[in-house]
Image (spheres, grey):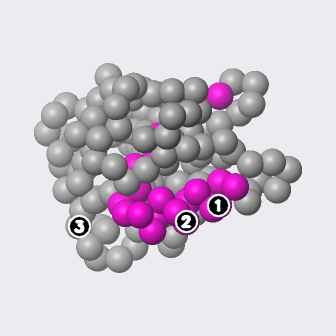
Amino acid sequence: MTKIRFLTDLRDPVLAAHAEVVRAWRPDAPRRVRVLTADAAQTERLERLLWEEPREGFIAHVRIDSPLAPVTPVLVDHAAEHPGAGDLLINLAAPPPSFFARFLELVELVGRDPAAVAAGRERWRHYKTRGFALSHQSAAAL
């Protein structure tokens, strides 16, 4: 069953997504990571961050429709469907991803603005009523 972790009270959820990708991806043991962004602007911003940081290299990534998607460990896209399974799904979108159960772990990133908080609470209820074990960590506690 998919492990679901919520990170809340985030000043910048896109930066938090970048940090999660960097933590998850290791050259010696890369994990298959997907990031579902809310829109094209978030996709482009996260792609830029992945090219620029870490300074000693970049994290190879592509969008879902790229011909290199099957062989690239990190996929970043705002497409409503992400085919296939993976190790880690990072969600920046408001609705729960319909395909989350194909992943070993889901990280839900929740910002501080009222709309993001309300959407995060809805996602929490969605997973909880379906019997998934949830964990929560507030950025304020970090």
- Disc 1 marks which residue? 49
- Disc 2 marks which residue? 45
Instruction: Indicate which disc, 2 or 3, sits on the residue closer to the N terminus.
Output: 2
Relative image position of residue 108 (x, y in whole percent): 39, 50
Between 84 and 137, the one lying in front of the other is: 84
Count neighbours of disc 3 (C-alpha within 10 A) and say few if under 14, some if 14 to 19, many if 20 or more. Answer: some
Between 23 and 125, the one lying in front of the other is: 23
Q: Is residue 2 magenta?
A: no
* Left or right: where 59 falls relative to 63: right
The amino acid type, in three-letter code, at marker 1 is Leu
| Residue projecting furthest to the bottom | 113
Count neighbours of disc 2 (C-alpha within 10 A) and say few if under 14, some if 14 to 19, many if 20 or more. Answer: some
Q: For residue 9, say whether it is visible.
A: no
Relative image position of residue 68 (x, y in whole percent): 56, 33
The quadrant of the rendering that contains the N terminus is: top left
The quadrant of the rendering that contains the C terminus is: bottom right
- Residue 124 vertical placement versus 133 (above, below): below
Q: Is residue 43 magenta?
A: yes
Q: Nearer the viewer, mark 2 or mark 3?
A: 2
- Disc 3 marks which residue? 118
Count neighbours of disc 1 (C-alpha within 10 A) and say few if under 14, some if 14 to 19, many if 20 or more. Answer: some
The amino acid type, in three-letter code, at marker 2 is Arg
Relative image position of residue 93 (x, y in whole percent): 33, 57
Asked if the residue under mark 2 is in contact with the one under mark 1, i.e. CB atoms within 8 Å, the reply is: yes
| Residue plotted at (74% across, 30% down) | 27
| Spatial separation of the CA atoms under disc 2 and disc 3 | 24 Å
| Residue plotted at (31% across, 68% down) | 116
| Residue plotted at (51% across, 34% down) | 67
- What segment is highlighted magenta in the picture? 30-51
| Spatial separation of the CA atoms under disc 1 and disc 2 | 6 Å
Relative image position of residue 26 (x, y in whole percent): 71, 33
